[in-house]
Image (cartoon, grey):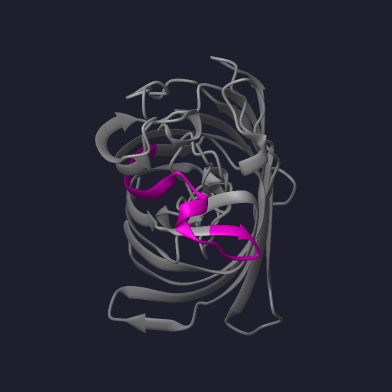
Amino acid sequence: MKKKIIDSRLRNVCAGLSAVAAAPGVALGCACGCGVFDVATSSMLPEGPGGMAYFELAYQDQNRNWSGTSWSPSVDNGDKKIETAFETIGLQYMFNRSWGAELELPFASRNFKTEDAAGAVVDRRWDAFGDIRLKAIYTGFSPDMSSGLTFGLKLPSGSDNRLADVVDRDSEIGSGSTDVLLGAFTRGEFGSSPWNWYGQGELDMPFLKQGDYRPGVEADVAWGIYYEGLTLGRARITPIAQIIGSWRGRDNGAAANPDDSGYQRVMLSPGIEIHVHPVTFYADVEIPVYDHVTGNQLIAPVLFKLSLSYMF
């Protein structure tokens, strides 16, 4: 079956409260780009010891067939639709001003329409846990914790063989692979103004596989600006503007289709963060402005995300 691309970051959540620009995300085994969700954003990088629990709800509908940089007829792709609601709970804790850790537990509900072996379009729905992510966080480069590194593993804990007679490996909720995760972030100010900026990136490198399917290596970066001068009573309101880029190599293995996997992508993402200590609400929309895919892949025209976090 033709591969597909998940057009959004979908994991820039919890108002940037983790060390990867504080954006825990959904650790799902998507063939095209769940890792981009980890390079999200926000005005709230770690500033000292403490923890945060968070919940994220995100939605996307991959319903457009794409080839190269443009629309392609749906008859060119056996897959017709991948509609997914993602839910993630997580915990991030900074033990001191230098070291912290993060744990993410994802869950997804998916509606998948594709052609079966006889050429008939079938509709499959299922719920499953995704791949757990464990990360260490280092912020000891400066007293203000404005720069840092993250490193960890994505574990093959998610479902990767549900409805295997119809669902191909890159459409499963779990990837079946064990991945090394390496990230970095930094932030700064525009002089003495209330405007601030940040940048971050993450590299996802699968190194162990199951069922002869290995997802492609993925690199994701984000750069954004945010404004900290707005308040309403006790609420601090932060508008955010982001640009996100990602590159993913082709999948490989006997269960993969390298001719229909791999892509480059650029997205624009306006968002807003509302903070009333110790609670933060975050929402954004991610809009692709450039997609270049290998072969035929399904893309989503837009993605929506909400998150709620509690600091302690």
**Magenta segment, which residues?**
66-90
Residue 22 position in % (x across, y down): 52, 51
The residue lying at 37 percent from left, 65 percent from top is 283
Q: What x and y, as percent, mark residue 52?
A: 39, 44
Residue 229 image offset from top left, x and y in percent:
48, 83
Q: Nearer the viewer, residue 104 or 116?
A: 116
What residue is at 61 percent from the left and 26 percent from the top?
Answer: 179
Q: Is residue 67 visible?
A: yes
Up-down relation of residue 26 to residue 257 (above or below): below
| Depth check, front residue: 291 or 218 | 291
Residue 136 percent coordinates (x, y): 59, 32
Residue 22 seen in this snapshot: no
Residue 214 vertical position relative to residue 261 in the rendered view, above or below: above
Q: Is residue 196 above or below residue 114?
A: below
Q: Which image quadrant is residue 213 in?
A: top right
Q: Residue furthest front?
A: 118
Front one among 104 and 137: 104
Residue 140 falls in which quadrant of the image? Answer: top right
